[in-house]
Image: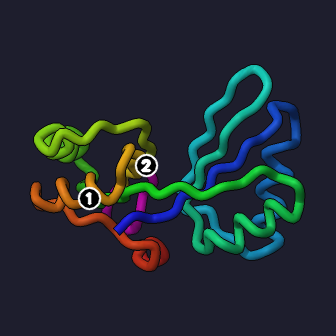
Amino acid sequence: MAVNQVSVFLENKPGTLNQMTKVLANHGVNIRALSLADTNDFGIARMIVNDVFEATNVLKEENFVATFTPVLIYAISDEAGSLNKILEKFTAANVNVEYMYAFAGKKNAYMIFRVKDTANAEKLLSSQGLKSLTQEQIADV
């Protein structure tokens, strides 16, 4: 099951990232994973949060450009070669990774993958023995 990632466009200047995290903190939104990519003029913060709809709504109320995007999250063992093993299954299923990032949980590492067609990719990856996390499971990892 795909998980919704929050993507926020940020002006690339001092304090903008802090303003965004302050809005989320003030509304009780917990950031579980974060990736930040930048260019000269703007950046994109990609986040897995405990409440996607609250995060998106409060950010928009504070004039941030925020959207959500479906991503797939898989648990991997925190040991050498684990990422390679899961990527071999992506290759076997002919699934291309557009981007990825990770976060550490209590027992495992968790890889977040953005692919073109999450529903089709999930079906193909399921045939390779992979089961993605759900939005509800994120809170417990």
Residue that badge 1 annotates: 122
Instruction: Say whether residue 113 is visible.
Output: yes
Secondary structure, mark 2, is strand
Quadrant location of the N terminus in the rendered image: bottom left
Vertical side of 24 occupied by 8: above or below: above
Q: Is residue 59 above or below residue 113?
A: below
Separation of residues labelled 2 and 1 (CA atoms):
18 Å
Name the spot of residue 33 as percent of width and height, x first.
54, 55
Q: Which residue is mark 2?
A: 102
- The question of residue 90 being in magenta is answered with no
Q: Please rate how many residues cluster around mark 2, counting C-alpha atoms within 10 Å: few if below 14, some from 14 to 19, many from 20.
A: some
Taking the spot 87% from the left edge, 35% from the top edge, the residue there is: 14
Residue drawn 43% across the image and 49% down it: 102
In the image, taking residue 56 as reference, residue 19 lies left or right, namely right
Residue interval drawn in magenta:
102-109
Q: Nearer the viewer, mark 2 or mark 1?
A: 1
Judge from the rendering whether residue 65 lies leftward or rightward of residue 36; answer left or right.
right
